[in-house]
Image: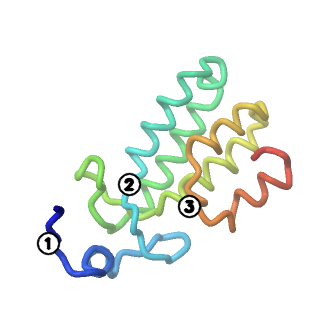
Amino acid sequence: MVKKFFSPGFERDTIQQAYEGYSCIQCSQPITNPICHECLGRQITNWLSLYPSIKKKFQPKLKKYLTDVHNNVMDGVNCASCQKHQAALCPYCFTEGIFDLLKRSKIDRMVVMDFLSTFNFDLKHEGYIQDAIKEGLY
């Protein structure tokens, strides 16, 4: 038998209270999945290792994007991954920025499709995934 320690709704209420006041600097929605730009950037850099020639071309643009995000972070919630950096941009907005950067960089469609399947934070399919579907990328 599994013993219940918390009342129904405890987790949701606790999470909402913990992140209250921490909104994304871009979309102003609450940051409920606090992963900082540094940790997401490392994950994307690791993923780019699958495509060495594209990594070489795209890495400077990714670094510039990370620097721009970093320069705009003033306050945020502690990152759930590293506990060091502040998550001030929600993962949705961060990956939307990378997706746009990949498209503007004219990166191969298959690589962009792989990015979308690996780093899809548009879980409701109401944002950038709709654009990707229209373009045949998702």
Label 1 sits on residue = 5
Rounded to the nearest angstrom, the CA distance separating label 2 from label 1 is 27 Å
- At a point 63% along the width and 39% down the height, the residue shown is 115
The structure residue drawn at horizontal position 35% and vertical position 67%, both measured from the top left corner, is: 74
Mark 2 burial class by Cα count in 10 Å: few <14, some 14-19, many 20+ = many
Farthest residue, direction front? 1
Q: Secondary structure at mark 1?
A: loop
- Of the image marks 1 and 3, the number of the one nearer the N terminus: 1
Residue depicted at x 74% and y 38%? 105
Looking at the rendered structure, the kind of residue marked 3 is: Cys
Specify whether 48 is left or right of 54.
Answer: left
Front disc: 2 or 1: 1
- Image coordinates for residue 61, horizontal then vertical, percent: 60, 38
Circles 1 and 3: CB distance less than 8 Å? Answer: no
- SS for tag 3? helix
Front residue of 64/128: it is: 128
Judging by the rendered image, the residue that carries numbered circle 3 is 93
Residue 73 falls left or right of residue 120: left
x, y (%) of residue 31?
A: 41, 69
In the rendered image, which residue does mark 2 sit on? Answer: 35
| Real-space CA distance between mark 2 and mark 3, rounded to the nearest whole angstrom | 12 Å
In this rendering, is residue 115 above or below 29? above
